[in-house]
Image (cartoon, rainbow, N blue to C red):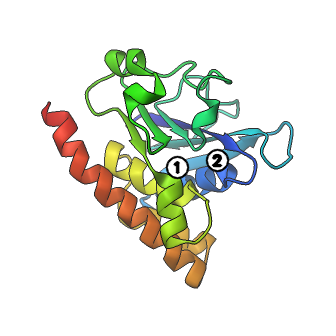
Amino acid sequence: MSMFQARFHGRGGQGVVTAAEMLSVAAFLEGKHAQAFPSFGSERMGAPVVSFCRIADHEIRLREPVLEPDALIIQDPTLLFSVDVFHGLTEKGWVIINSSKGITELGIDSLVERLPAGHVRTLAATELALKHIGRPLPNAVMLGGLAAMSGVIRLESVIAAISEAFPGPVGQSNIAAATAAHEILAASQKDKVAC
């Protein structure tokens, strides 16, 4: 891996910035170099928010926003057509969308057609968060899904990063949600790649 770049899209209050930070911590725990930072704009609850994470085997000197992401983590599907969330996505990029709807229902078939099999997935992250955490916070859930899809980080590293960010019972419930997401996407990822 030379450098893996991820861009997170969501709304204020969904933990978009925290998700990028946890991804960078997970990578760091695996001995990689990592950085995470948000794109500051309107800070109010519900406003679109973007954050970034870079992971590399070497020191990272870049400081600008991620313009050509290898992974897109879309925590709010209402952003799909109000913001150009897919801008710059690499030809072998990964996309994970927080939605209980399928790809066709979301109207993004053309995106799926231009990427490798299994690289665009939906995950009902809000529902998993409500079940395990009791709150609609999809960030840790999405990281569990990203680990299953891309293999860029291990679930064990995600769990350690969550524990560091949220000690105690809150962390344990987030870990349960992330683990459930990982299991769901890991099982179906095998099917998608086999197609």
Task: Kindly state the secondary structure of the residue where label 2 is placed.
Answer: strand
- On screen, 165 above or below 136? below
Q: Quadrant of the N terminus?
A: top left
Image coordinates for residue 97, horizontal then vertical, percent: 48, 39
Residue in the picture at 79% in, 40% down? 47
Residue 110 seen in the figure: yes
Image coordinates for residue 91, horizontal then vertical, percent: 39, 18
CA separation, marks 2 and 1?
Answer: 11 Å
- The answer to which of 54 and 129 lies nearer the viewer is 129
Amino acid found under the numbered disc labelled 2: Ala
- Quickly name the residue at label 1: 33
Near mark 2 (Cα within 10 A), the count class, few <14, some 14-19 or many ≥20, is many
Residue in the picture at 42% in, 57% down? 144
What residue occupies the far bottom of the structure in this picture? 168
Image coordinates for residue 133, horizontal then vertical, percent: 55, 71
| Residue 167 image-quadrant placement | bottom right
Q: Which mark is residue 180?
A: none
- The answer to which of 8 and 154 lies nearer the viewer is 8
